[in-house]
Image (cartoon, rainbow, N blue to C red):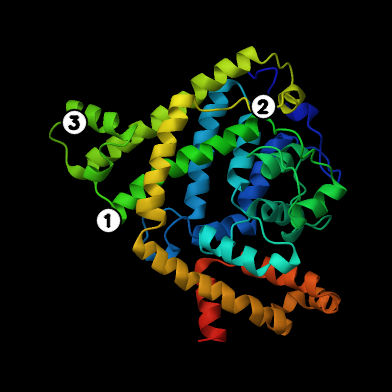
């Protein structure tokens, strides 16, 4: 049964371009389905999570990460009586705006775009689903509901101060009320992201040999998980032992969010989704102790994985690729795809517009395409 503070598709704020409702699917289910069928979603399968996509077939990519986030989010939303379809839509879309090479590519593109308004992957996700996806006859983008757009824009909390240009441009047309918190569903998607990457980065780091099981044995959450596995399965092999332990870490984080958030929701007095937005504080949270434990895991991963020598070497390599491609396309816009020719002609007299077009092109590249274009054009 759906809770009174859950987002109700019947009373959803609708789409910027009016459409007939589906006979068989709710508006939020249609949002989720459009995201799954989007070109930008498919490209996530060849975009870096931590390891560059072609370094190994077993490491997470942005696509597998997004699917794992959606799975966690569905579980939490169901336990709390929230709208699972809206939660899943936001979860699946939350990384659509990522560049090739993950946060490394984003950092490089943000620096290059500094004279033209910078770059932000959350704002880019909004631009993708409202403009850059161009498959429908009646509108650009996916024409998602206000609820889903709001969740993508501010699932990490209110967006205040100087807005990223891509978000500011759309918000001027369709007010997403950026000063408030997002729905409980979007807040679930945000914490599900934390749960998924903290868990799977431990798994991928072990597989890559960046650290050993002995080195994570004393980490919060990890230590009791391994102890329980050793008690229950004393003779299991190392691979099964690792999997059993990390799935318990996963479960502890999910259970903590459900129990903590259930208490916050029961006591917040919200009777509608609008009430959740205007509480002035998040209602989906980890407990204080769990957050402290997660921060310890993050600190370990930052030092031993995200800043590992082999990862830093690759970061330098892919940063150079982005730094080479951006000025090349900016000075030679005729190298951009032919189907952008009309836009290029319109942007030719405005360097900021042209730079943002080049940014959109590079941000949409997969890892392998960025590599191949760099090799083809620069060598």
Crowding at label 2, few (<14), some or many (≥20) Cα neighbours within 10 Å? some
- Mark 3 and mark 2 lie on one chain; the one further toward the N terminus is 3
Residue underneath mark 3 = 230
Residue 289 visible, this angle: yes
Q: At 81% from the left edge and 37% from the top edge, which residue is drawn?
A: 14
Location of residue 347 with respect to 210 vertically, above or below:
below
Spatial CA distance of label 1 from label 3 is: 22 Å
Q: Where is residue 335 in the image (x, y as percent from the top left)?
A: 68, 83
Task: Say what secondary structure mark 2 lies in.
Answer: loop
Q: At 57% from the left edge and 72% from the top edge, which residue is drawn?
A: 322
Spatial CA distance of label 3 from label 2 is: 41 Å
Location of residue 105 with respect to 169 vertically, above or below:
below
Q: Position of residue 87 (x, y in %)?
A: 62, 35
Q: Position of residue 188 (x, y in %)?
A: 58, 32
Crowding at label 3, few (<14), some or many (≥20) Cα neighbours within 10 Å? some
Spatial CA distance of label 2 from label 1 is: 40 Å
**Which mark identifies residue 5?**
none
**Residue that sits furthest to the left in the current view:** 235
**Which mark identifies residue 281?**
2
């Amino acid at each position: 049964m759906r809770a009174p503070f859950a987002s109700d598709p019947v009373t959803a704020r609708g789409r910027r371009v009016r459409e007939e409702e589906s006979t068989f699917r709710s508006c939020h289910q249609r949002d989720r389905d459009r995201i799954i069928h989007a070109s930008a979603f498919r490209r996530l399968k060849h975009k870096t999570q931590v390891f560059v996509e072609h370094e190994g077939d077993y490491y997470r990519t942005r696509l597998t990460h997004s699917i794992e986030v959606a799975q966690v989010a569905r579980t939490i939303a169901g336990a709390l009586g929230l709208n699972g379809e809206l939660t899943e839509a936001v979860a699946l879309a939350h990384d659509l705006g990522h560049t090739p090479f993950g946060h490394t590519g984003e950092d490089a593109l943000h620096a290059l775009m500094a004279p033209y308004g910078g770059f932000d992957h959350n704002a880019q996700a909004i631009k993708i689903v409202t403009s850059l996806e161009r498959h429908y006859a009646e509108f650009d983008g996916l024409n998602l509901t206000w609820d889903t757009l709001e969740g993508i824009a501010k699932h990490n909390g209110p967006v205040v101060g100087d807005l990223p240009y891509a978000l500011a441009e759309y918000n001027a047309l369709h007010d997403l009320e950026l000063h408030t918190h997002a729905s409980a569903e979007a807040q679930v998607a945000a914490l599900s992201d934390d749960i998924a990457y903290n868990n799977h980065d431990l798994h991928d780091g072990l597989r890559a040999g960046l650290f050993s099981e002995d080195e994570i044995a004393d980490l919060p959450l990890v230590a009791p998980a391994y102890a329980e596995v050793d008690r229950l399965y004393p003779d299991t092999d190392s691979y099964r032992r690792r999997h059993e332990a990390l799935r318990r870490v996963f479960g502890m984080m999910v259970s903590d969010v459900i129990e903590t958030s259930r208490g916050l929701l029961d006591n917040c007095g919200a009777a509608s989704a609008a009430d959740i937005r205007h509480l002035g504080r998040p209602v989906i949270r980890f407990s204080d102790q769990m957050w402290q434990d997660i921060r310890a895991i993050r600190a370990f991963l930052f030092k031993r994985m995200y800043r590992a020598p082999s990862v830093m070497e690759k970061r330098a390599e892919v940063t150079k690729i982005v730094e080479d491609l951006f000025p090349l396309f900016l000075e030679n816009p005729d190298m951009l795809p032919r189907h952008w020719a009309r836009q290029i002609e319109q942007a030719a007299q405005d360097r900021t517009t042209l730079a943002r077009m080049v940014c959109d092109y590079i941000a949409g590249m997969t890892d392998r395409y960025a590599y191949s274009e760099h090799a083809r054009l620069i060598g």
